[in-house]
Image (cartoon, rainbow, N blue to C red):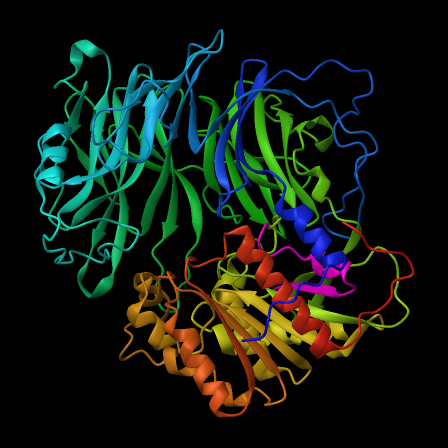
Amino acid sequence: MATVTEDGGPGAAALEVLLAQPRVRTAHRLGDGLLVEADLRRPGRADPVPYVLGYGPAPATADRPPGDAGRRTAPHGTATVTAPDRAPAQPVLEYAYAGASSVTVTGDGGHLFLSDMRPGTGRPRGHTGRALWRHRPGPRRAPELVLSAPRGLLSYAAASSTAVAAAWLRSGARSLAEDLRAREAAAPDAPTATLVGGDLWPRSMYHEAGETVRLLWSGPPAESEGADGTRLLTPPLDQDMRLTGELALTPDGLRCAAGVVRFLPGGHRRHGQLLFPVRDPADATAVWAPDDDLTEAVAAPDGAWFACTAERIAAPGRGPRQEVVLLAADGSRLERAAPGHRDWLRPRSWAAPDTLLCVGERDGRRRLWRVRPGDGRAEPIEVAGSVLAVTGVPGEAVVVRSGIDLPPEVVSVPLASAGRPTGPAGARRLLAPAAAAAPTGRMERLTYRAPDGSVWSSWLCLPRTGADRPLPVLVWCHGGPLSSWTDWSWRWNPWPFVAEGYAVLMPDPPLSVGYGQPAVERGWGHWTSQVAAVAAAQVRSALARPDLDAGRVAAMGGSFGGYLALALGTLLPEVRLIASHAGWADFAAVARVCDLHWHWLREYGPVDTAPGYARESLRLAAIDPGVRVLLSHGCEDTHVPMGESRAIHRSLETRGVDVRLMLLPDERHTIGKPANVTAWYRWVLDACHTVLGPRSTSKEPCTP
């Protein structure tokens, strides 16, 4: 493998700035302040560390610009990316909890969160991993332990004085103490052999021998059982059902929705909701929609409904689609909240009993929608950029937004009354912690009209000013495949490459979401014959521009994007360099062994008999021997096992192709560790400089 370059050019500088920024995931209103969940890069830690950050109100200032002043955006045209003219006053950081996530704001002005921290109060003997903690309002005090388990908590839901949590526990244990005794009594040389039930993989990010996901309850001490102040909840499950760890609780703490999965013969699976009264879990009702998977339950403020994402059960020849459904808290009714809506709505938060906040994909943006139970309609709430996360309180939505050209920031969006959608000028920026990574460059929206009349979109990222000759082009293919180029990316970020003088083309071909159901159906089960073919036509159309150099083209991507980059290498003679992370060529080989086997079955059918696997698999012999191919793969990847990249490497090397392989022993499906991300970027940038020739000289320096 070639040595990773230590080039200190403008791309490397932009990358260092990028990797140093706080990565905001979600934000919550807490009185006049904010609670922000973010990942921070910390010295001595290989991975970004999750934090819960508590902010007090921003100090009053006359210089604060209203709304989005200082940044010009044009989601459907050209956008010039500039730093804000005047940064808004930032809220004051008052406290921070490391290793923390999953905030729930409580009615007393405090909040709950999960964390693996070990404050002085300690935990019960033998309890490790993430535990549930309470932060109380008022003078700074140490957080209080609420609930823990021997191997940590997977998730929780909390309301009123009640919390329900999911944890890996021994199947037969009748209490946490019994579970712990069994673990401590296990001999060091005890067998680890596990009989697999359903499609779960033993000891592969899931569970140890003899474990299953079980539920714990924590509530008023008078109702607790056992010395540990908790009790196990044991709602009845059929033999082929398992809990997934998804949990939602009505605000009164009386009724719970727990995600369940049913493993079916042949590797198929279904997802539903298990509804039960917390004080009587034996009275549980399993709800399975006839044609949909039900996930992501969110409880309404009045406790009447759980809003869920309903995803149609796909099959060969019929793609999935997503919409919002309302499930009565007792399981008696299931209603579609906005029937026929085209934007793949997903529920995220309730701001009031009549205000369900949802996100939906449309034309390269993830937009915010307001759905009213019983109304059957969705009202748009305009927020510039793309919505990453949203939490609601009466009269306000707290939104984390971003864009390909906009690092994540927190804004407050007032919720107007019925029939009066909120305009973008009403959004007020609350926090922009990654503003230093805002790129200097420009973006254009490209469209390609196919001979059949269909229209396909791409984003083109360019240096701010023109160059002295046409720019080399990096074609970036998104993963998914049910995804699109919508958000700011900490991993696939084009701006360090733009800083080096490259144009980055980001196409949204068939299977990209946000372009209507026909775009999904066209690509479903036809990844090479349709998706790759349209993507190749998009690239050819863009290369006709005089400012792009059709003789210096690279194709890159990760996961499905890694496959698509290889596919473009077989279809486009213009491609001189391919960089594929966690990609594949042999569909059947991946489908047989990966942990997403059930998805392959829905899209292509049985692996041994359906013709689509062979029809759509790549013919690597079509890659010109003069093309350089960079393959990278995480050795702990279970979505696309690492052996596929080894197989591609061996196949291409046998043909004399200049193919290089980067293995990442401590990574899974994506590359998460900043040091590994840096190594990958520098490796790929070095190949770009070598294969695509000298960098073009901009008339004006392009800096981060």
Residue 570 is inside the magenta segment: no
Q: Position of residue 610 (x, y in %)?
A: 31, 78
Residue at image coords 34%, 61%: 596
Whether residue 89 is visible to the viewer of this picture, yes or no, is yes
Residue at image coords 78%, 25%: 66
Residue at image coords 43%, 27%: 103
Closer to us: 370 or 135: 135
Whether residue 461 is visible to the viewer of this picture, yes or no, is no
Quarter-of-image position of residue 493: bottom right
Quarter-of-image position of residue 4: bottom right
Relative side of 603 to 46, left or right: left
Relative side of 313 to 460, left or right: left
Q: Residue furthest bottom?
A: 655
Relative side of 267 to 385, left or right: left
Q: Residue furthest top?
A: 138
**Which residues lie in the magenta part?**
490-508
Task: Please tell me whether residue 46 is drawn above or below residue 317 in the rendered image.
Answer: above
Closer to us: 555 or 93: 93
Q: Position of residue 45 (x, y in %)?
A: 49, 43
Q: Position of residue 250 (x, y in %)?
A: 32, 23
Residue at image coords 29%, 39%: 245
Task: Please tell me whether residue 642 is drawn above or below residue 223 in the rendered image.
Answer: below
Q: Position of residue 699 (x, y in %)?
A: 92, 61
